[in-house]
């Protein structure tokens, strides 16, 4: 991998990653990071499950952007508290 990323960068790009709205190089860097970092993998998996749960209970509707942003911000705050 050319440019590995750290936990902070991965978490900053969480929302974009889940929406596949980042360049392919960054998508790959995050995927590689998630293979090596169990903490981020758990965080990303929880976010994805939350979005999926919303879509199932909302009849397949997309999660509103503001909700995705709020979820990402909350996860970033929790990550920052952990160190």
Image (cartoon, helix red, strand yellow):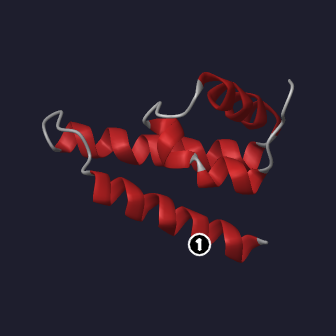
Q: Is residue 28 left or right of residue 55?
A: right
Most foreground residue, 42 or 32: 32
Name the quadrant containing residue 70: bottom left
Q: Is residue 72 above or below residue 44?
A: below
Please tell me which residue is depicted at 55% across the width and 63% down the height of the picture.
Answer: 75
Please tell me which residue is depicted at 67% across the width and 41% down the height of the picture.
Answer: 41
Q: Position of residue 78 (x, y in %)?
A: 61, 70
Please tell me which residue is depicted at 69% across the width and 72% down the height of the picture.
Answer: 80
Q: Which residue is mark 1?
A: 77
**SS for tag 1?**
helix
Please tell me which residue is depicted at 77% across the width and 36% down the height of the picture.
Answer: 33
Most foreground residue, 62 or 39: 62
Total marks drawn?
Answer: 1
Name the quadrant containing residue 51: top left
Q: Position of residue 13 (x, y in %)?
A: 58, 47
- If the image is split into quadrants, where does the N terminus sit? top right
Q: Residues within 10 Å of mark 1 (few under 14, many from 20)?
A: few
Name the quadrant containing residue 56: top left
- If the image is split into quadrants, where does the C terminus sit? bottom right
Residue furthest out toward the left: 59
């Amino acid at each position: 991998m050319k440019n590995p990323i750290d936990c902070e960068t991965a978490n900053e790009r969480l929302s974009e990653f889940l929406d596949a709205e980042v360049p392919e190089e960054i998508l790959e860097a995050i995927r590689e990071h998630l293979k090596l970092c169990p903490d981020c993998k758990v965080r990303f998996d929880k976010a994805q499950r939350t979005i999926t749960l919303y879509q199932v209970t909302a009849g397949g509707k997309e999660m509103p952007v503001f909700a995705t942003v709020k979820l990402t911000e909350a996860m970033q705050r929790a990550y920052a508290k952990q160190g």
